[in-house]
Image (spheres, rainbow, N blue to C red):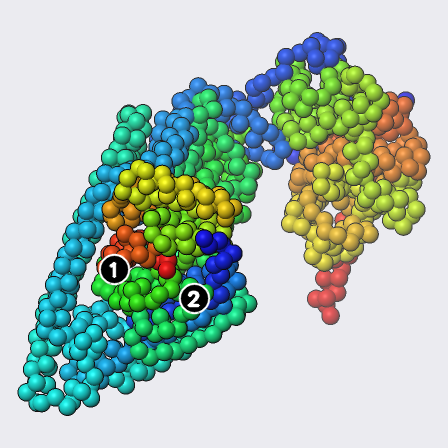
Amino acid sequence: MTGPADIVIRRIIFALDAATESPDSLEAAAELAERLHAELVGLFVEDANLLRSAALPFVREINLASGQWQAFEPAAIERDMRARAARARQLVEAAARRRHLGFSFLVARGEIGREVAAAAGETDLIVLEGLTEILRGRVRMGSGTRAVARQTARTVMVLRRGALDARNFLVAYEDTPEADRALVIAARLAAANRATIAVLVIAADSPKADELRLRATKVLERLGVEGTVEILGEPSLIDLCGFARRIQHAVLVVGANGTFAKGDAADRLMDRISCPLVLVR
Amino acid sequence: MPKTAKPSKKKTPSAPAKTNAKAAPLAADILRRRTDPAGLGFKTTAEIEPLNEALGQERAMEAIRFGIGMVQDGYNLFALGPDGIGKHRMVRQFLERQAAGEPVPADWCYVHNFENAYKPRALSLPPGKARPFRADMDHLIDELRAALPAAFETEDFRGQRQAIEERMKQLHEGAFNEFQEKAKAKGAALIRTPSGLTLAPIKGEEVMDPEEFQKLPAEEKQAIQKNIEALQTELQQVMEKLPAWEQDARKQMRDLNRRTAQFAISHILEEVKRRYAEVPEVLEYLAAVEKDMIDNAEDFLKPDQQAQPVPGAPPVPTQAAASPFARYKVNVLIDNSDREGAPVFYEDHPNHPNLFGKIEYRAVFGALITDFSMILPGALHKANGGYLVVDARKVLMQPYGWEELKHALRSREIRIEPLGYAFGGAGAMMMEPEPIPLNIKVVLLGDRQLYYMLASGDPEFGELFKVPVDFEEYVEREPKNGKLYARFLASLIDGDKLRPFTASAIAKVMERASRLVEDSERLSMELRRVGGLLREADYWAGQRKADTVDAKDVDQAIEAQIRRSDRMRERMEEQTVRGIVHIDTSGEKVGQVNGLSVLSLGDHSFGKPSRITASVGLGKGEVVDIEREVALGGPLHSKGVLILQGFLAERYGAEQPLSLKASLVFEQSYGGVDGDSASSAELYTLLSALSEAPIKQSFAVTGSVDQHGNVQAIGGVNEKIEGFFDLCKARGLTGQQGVMIPATNVTHLMLREDILAAAKDGKFRVFPIETIDQGIEVLTGVPAGVRGKNGRYPANTINGRVQTRLDTFAAAARRFAHKGRAS
């Protein structure tokens, strides 16, 4: 069994690509690093697919602001990526210096999921901005975020756009191997953010629910963390998201192999959830 | 004891003067009219009822009654009279009595104008309703603060909102998923770029390598390109659908929010509407509130959210922003809940904002912002429906105070505008609160000069202030008025919470009141000075730990008042006693007489003797006023000297031209001289110089003279007598000293007790004089002489000697003329 002291987060890897512009999320990541006494790593991924697309002679891009097609030149996208990387470096450096954090900045070229997965180690927490405005008005999770969430073997925190104001950590607690780890990470993050913790027991039947409740209570007791344990039964993904939405300043913590994050479910969860999400691995 | 006489009742004569009977000094009891304390009918003022009405101001009160009664435009009032006579007090008392029986005017509020935030709405409510209305709106806001978010938290609302979002999401996802599937099926992928989306051919999971693409056969490359171009067209079509979907979703969301808000708001507002059902303006406002709340319901859902900015106003930072509910608050401008009757409001500092109200501003990061809640009322608002009293001079001295006041009265409405508007200097867009109808009587207070100046100089004044309220400065000292005056004094004593005054103290105050108006037959209504005397007498009574104020306290108060202001007089007298300023008070001199003048320093006046001399010689019949020659003489003094020429011509120039040149001067006078009160003295010294009859220097003279030799009344008679008396007293009273005054001034005598005592002991005399002949006899001891049938005066008289001297001058002049012609 793991305890809070056993889970050490040494680095916060803030990952971004050319399609994301996330000063608020970077600030949130830096603040998290400060609270966890971790190093801040900025990882800018130059999307290889994007570069290849631009090199194809007939490929154009449609501008989201104007709705008009326009040329998509490799030189232009290279320039754009360099400028964005430089800007991201400045932001990471400034955020780290303000907080007296150790920091580094990496630029990788390739597929974002793979590059982030390659860069992250066991004691790292990957932080990304989860909301990408794909189309005017509506929001859905960007493909980069999905790729990272899907491909990395590390814990990923998906932020919503804007400052992180985490006051209530909700842990979806299931009978999965990483359930306790999720609970411990939630406790660790809650302690760092001086937030409350609520365990939401997910179980198909009452005996199982009781068993999980007992297990969660014991984990909390062992951690010396005060928290509530509530049995949700078998909520749908919509129910779970609705529950999280009703709690102000919530952060939902789920195990990556649980009902709501396994396989394609992770994509659906990321699309629906309106609060920050931690996928624990 | 010298022989004394009662004053002549004869009025100022206009006919040629005749030599009257010899002048005799006045009896001591004539020198001051006393008030008999026993005649007042009380021991102390505690026994009498204070007079709560204006004494002797019937004309003024009649005018006020008329002005108040006239409901037509322009019948505002101007209360005119000297400062300190209690115009303000009397007007206020009268108006307050009148206003008490009049209806209480409406309350006024300013509220947000939802159509135009720059023009806040003015709401009129029945008296006493404004504060409850404000409380009701505050309560409404509190209710809504809880009810609105609750309404938007219900499962029903969430469900409906989610359904809209779901529909939207489904549309999006459906379209894009379908497109993406189609693209995938055709070997392409939709990829996010920094500024949009692109479509690229894929191989496996990745975009096709460009080099690999180049190696493909031309037909295959062309097919891929066509495929991508076809997909681009389709993507364009998908994208074109988005705005309509989004618009539709937003409209559905807005409608849902409106329905939810309306449900939450309506039943809460209904209660307020019921309460103000009889005030249509409020109902109209509440309808606007309801509409605005429904339209902007989303503003109220997040407590930390920035307030909706006033359109056009500078952006307000979150920390300084008011709550989004702030625009539903009520600014109570006028609250008449505690009022009984119509208001009577006096504005002591009638500058523009104090009169017309003002708009305050709050500085936020260098920008000045304001709204309806920062509108403050002015005096016109406070007095609306009643009476406003202001000092005319103060209004006139304030920039644009007068012009704006007239504008308000003309337009019958109160506009609150920044002062910059008045002179067209405000370029920036500013708030313009809705004007409030004005129904008011304005009473201006001012002196007569100001009234006449406005009446002649400002054409609008007569239109807007049609009612002059002219206050008397005094009342007649009749027996019935004496008792009323005592009650009037009792009201002042009562008002100032002074000790009771004994009857003898009141008698002293009344005597002083006569002295203040320089008339023994009148009593001053100058509240400032009479009231001051009462308060100071009370102080002195307090110093001796007395329960009542007695005559000696009044005397002490008067003496102390004089003492405090008397330094200059003492220094001047000292200069004379030391001989630096030459004034004789004994002996006889030809061509020299003591004249008397009055100096006023603030409230304090005193008499000052002056040595007037005359010299005569051969000339062309002119009397030279040396003061005028050196520009130290005023026009009235010059007039007096010219009258002397007329006198000489009439009396002595009937048969031959006056061949003299005379010079008159105020010796050792280094300031200006004006007034004609020294003209009799100048004539005496001229007659002395011509007749070579010496004048007794133990006398001082005052009085003006006409061309016929009649002596006429002057001002400041008491001060003048006292001025000469003080000098004589300082040198020692001889019994020969005295003052000659016009007989018509006898009724003005209210002299000091020490002069009365000296007169009683025969040590000082006051002679009432009617004609120059009477006066010259007193001064020289030589008969004036009456013209004989032959036109000549007896040789041993003053007139005879003057005539002879003038004959000599005429003969000399003829000789000179003859010589001149001969040469």
At which x and y percent is residue B256? 21, 43
In this picture, is B737 found above or below A34?
above
Q: Quadrant of the C terminus of chain A?
A: bottom left
Q: Are there few (<14), some (14-19), or many (20+) residues within 10 Å of tag 2?
A: some
Q: Chain of mark 2?
A: A
Mark 2: which secondary structure? loop
Q: Which residue is mark 2?
A: A122
User: Camera-side residue: B666 or B391?
Assistant: B391
Q: Are marks 1 and 2 on the same chain?
A: yes
Residue at image location 91% in from the left, 30% down from the top = B735
In this picture, is B309 found above or below A14?
above
Relative side of B763 to B521, left or right: right
Residue A263's label in the rendered image is: 1
Relative side of B822 to B356, left or right: right
**Visible residue check, residue A243:** no
Mark 1: which secondary structure? loop
